[in-house]
Amino acid sequence: MDSPHSSNSAWDRLCDVVEYSGIFDSEKRQPHSRCMVDTCVALRGTLRELLDRHDRTNIWLNGLAGVGKTSIAFTVAEEMKKARRLAATFFFSHKHAQSGAKIIPTIAYQLALTFPRIRDDITRAVEGDRMLLSSDKSRSDQIQELIVNPLHALKFRQDMPYAIIVDALDECFSAEEAARLVALLMEMLSGPELPIIHLIFTSRPEVHIRSTTQAGVHEISLTTRDDDTIQDVRFFLRASLDNIRTSRPSVFGRSPEPWPSDDEFETLVFKAGGLFIYAAMAMNFVSATRHHPKQRLALLLREKSTVGADIDQLYWQIIATSDNPLVHCRMLASIIHLYIPRPLVELQSLFYDDQEILAVTLEVFSPVILNPPDGNGDVEIYHGSLRDFISDPLRSKHYYVDATHTNEYLAICYLHLLLRETQRNPAYTYAQIIWCYHLSGAYPSSKLRHLLALFTKKCCLRQITWTTILYSERERLAYP
């Protein structure tokens, strides 16, 4: 018989490797991206019908970046959780430096909470194989031991089916790895003795995934040309603009006049081209504080677009509002290249000599950067397309900052922080861990080499000092 102590120890080990930011409604994922009321109605109805089926259904929701896959996946997860039919989720995101190796333990952890009867089976599996939670363990073995075998204990095949939802597979895996993981989950969850758990996963329309899953998946493609999608974007834009108009009486008056004009609105809808991410960031741009919404909208509509969805043009227009775009784009690239997002107070310590540049950068790029006003939360980009834009010289052109020079700047800032601050500073502990990461990818400039030599010398002197003190104290105690 297993002792309670060993079971608790195994559960603690599982909890230690869980990627909590991957759970769909984790506080780390705030603000959550969900569908507005009365949008995606037909699609959500189709998904509900598929999830109510009693024959196992694997659903692949695919589409280009920014088309709204995560919002739909989150909304479905909320609905399934409310109906007590959500088995587990894993929402990938570049924002949280997640490890793809933790997806199976994280799903197993949630299954143990959803189905308490199988928790002991999961902990026994962890106790029986100390390498089971390791990133070196094969995913096939992890799925078998942590998911499939425990689920055999459940006998409710006639009850309403559950769902496992995995969002943005291609955020942390290559197309080949994502296809292999999906194929494994589909195959291993299809056993006749298992309860019915539908698998929903989202990604870009990758060829490898399509070729691997052709026979056993219900594919739903989201496109920017779909009439329902365009209508939903239109609805979102109208509601957002109405809210801006009525919430700014100092700008529009107590009895707000109609705004924008029909022509302006139709031009904006065309420029969005069915991309929710463009629509959302455009509204952030227009509603930015200390700016006049009419002027911001006019700026947004000034350039005539030859294509419907022109996110790059939006980014260029935001850059155009800066009085020193080269400097501010370098700071933006530095924020984007951080290993994981950090709170504002830590960024102020990190960019100590450039705090004014940091403040202006956050103001300029406020439409596309999440910066919690109360300081309780991390500063992070609104959408991964901004990272793609600033990292591609063909798109950002002369504002492009090479990754090696960004890492050089970050390594210099971290070394300065370690030389300047004490361990009482919250940023110090993190800097001790992460400075080598940026150093490894940095351009070896003379400034960086000089600073590294100074830092190494200081560390050696500190170590020698502590060693001398400890040796003297030991001698004193040994020979009173």
Image (cartoon, rainbow, N blue to C red):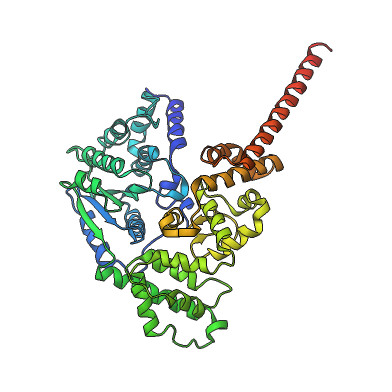
Residue 150, percent from left and from top: 29, 34
Q: Residue at x 55, y 63 (%)?
A: 325
Q: Is residue 382 visible?
A: no
Residue 460, percent from left and from top: 69, 28
Q: Is residue 111 visible?
A: yes
Does 217 sit above or below residue 458?
below
447 horizontally vs 293: left or right: right
212 horizontally vs 164: left or right: left
Quadrant of the rendered structure where residue 190 is?
top left
Q: Nearer the viewer, residue 472 or 127?
A: 472
Q: Residue at x 35, y 79 (%)?
A: 266
Q: Residue furthest right?
A: 480
Q: Nearer the viewer, residue 371 or 71?
A: 371
Q: Residue at x 27, y 37 (%)?
A: 151
144 horizontally vs 112: left or right: left
218 horizontally vs 464: left or right: left
Q: Residue at x 49, y 86 (%)?
A: 256
Does 451 sit above or below residue 30?
above
